[in-house]
Image: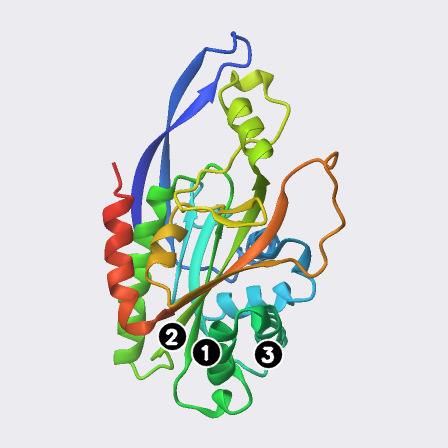
Amino acid sequence: MAKRKLQKDENASDDDGNDSDVSMVNVDFDFFAPNPEVDYIAFKRLLMQLFQSDSEILAVHDLADLILSQPAIGSTVKTDGEDGDPYAFLSVVNVHAHQERPCMKAIITYMLEKSTNQPELHNLLQGLLGPEGLKSSNHVGLIVSERVMNIPVELVPPMYRSLAEEIKEAVRQNEAFIFSHYIFLTRTYQLTASQFEELQATASEPTKKKTKPTLPPTGDVPMMNDGVSTYSYHPEDACIQSHSLFTLDYPLTTQQPRDEESLGLDMGGRIMAVPAERFQELVDKMMESHPAS
């Protein structure tokens, strides 16, 4: 049985009509608990999308198994019932409790290596996830979330609200979900000023005439470095960033060299560290910023 339902209107173009002939299609989105019987392949695919070319070194197959091993925590979004493929998911895993798993070992090493250029964040992560930190009672919750393109952001706040409630219930059941901090890993893209102007122009073209990548929807303030702006793929990341102690944008480890003629967008990742006492405030702000219509 679905946790809850949300109906959204989505644009649909008429393939037999002209470029301006656009209709609205009602789509029912249902929220379900993670289902280890049917969700593994879709979870792995979404995790590969989240971590992009670094997904192999982060053992996403093991991370998918880990998330699905705790079906009482987290949510998926589906349109074809519980046995359908999830189009989005959100969950949290206890890094300390699962530190011996291949995915957690890889992610810990990855975050510590990526954060070396930002001493304040690195010191925080070293204290939490270094050899001594992993022996501490101050556990870290790794928030893992991804969705396919065009899934509306309004679906995300209800998942976070449920996650906050599920964490509280798990704590009442004496499960290992008491955290001092939450770490968020998300994906980004980079644009020069000229690329931004070109993609903005592309976004205004009729749907059928678009041959170049379009701008993903985002609500965050771009972070600039050497004339290049970094944007988040997901609008809700702006809420997370506003509650984060530190935010770090980093290049992918295995990214292929690119030049001005390369297709697509320059990809990257982002780490955000949020104190546990700010998590409910973050959820409330997200509900306010992206209400379901």
Residue 260: numbered disc: none
Q: Position of residue 95 (x, y in %)?
A: 49, 77
Q: Nearer the viewer, mark 3 or mark 2?
A: 2
Q: Position of residue 44 (x, y in %)?
A: 60, 57
Report the amino acid beneath label 1: Leu
Q: Residue at x 35, y 81 (%)?
A: 175
Residue 137 lies in quadrant: bottom left
Judged left or right of residue 47, residue 157 is left
Dot 3: element: loop
Which comes before the other along the chain, label 3 or label 2?
3
Are the two marked residues, 3 and 2, in contact with CB atoms closer than 8 angstroms?
Answer: no
Residue 210 lies in quadrant: top right
Distance between the alpha carbons at the discs numbered 3 and 2:
20 Å
Q: Nearer the viewer, residue 236 or 39?
A: 236
Q: Position of residue 5 (x, y in %)?
A: 30, 44
Distance between the alpha carbons at the discs numbered 3 and 1:
22 Å
Residue 181: numbered disc: 2
Residue 165 lies in quadrant: bottom left
Q: Is residue 192 visible?
A: yes
Q: Nearer the viewer, mark 1 or mark 2?
A: 1
Report the amino acid beneath label 2: His
Judged left or right of residue 190, residue 53 is right
Q: How many residues crowd around disc 1 within 10 Å: few (fewer than 14), some, or many (20 or more)?
A: some
Report the amino acid beneath label 3: Arg
Residue 101: numbered disc: 3
Q: How many residues crowd around disc 2 within 10 Å: few (fewer than 14), some, or many (20 or more)?
A: many
Dot 1: element: helix
Q: Residue at x 51, y 27 (%)?
A: 200
Residue 124: numbered disc: 1
Q: Position of residue 66 (x, y in %)?
A: 53, 70
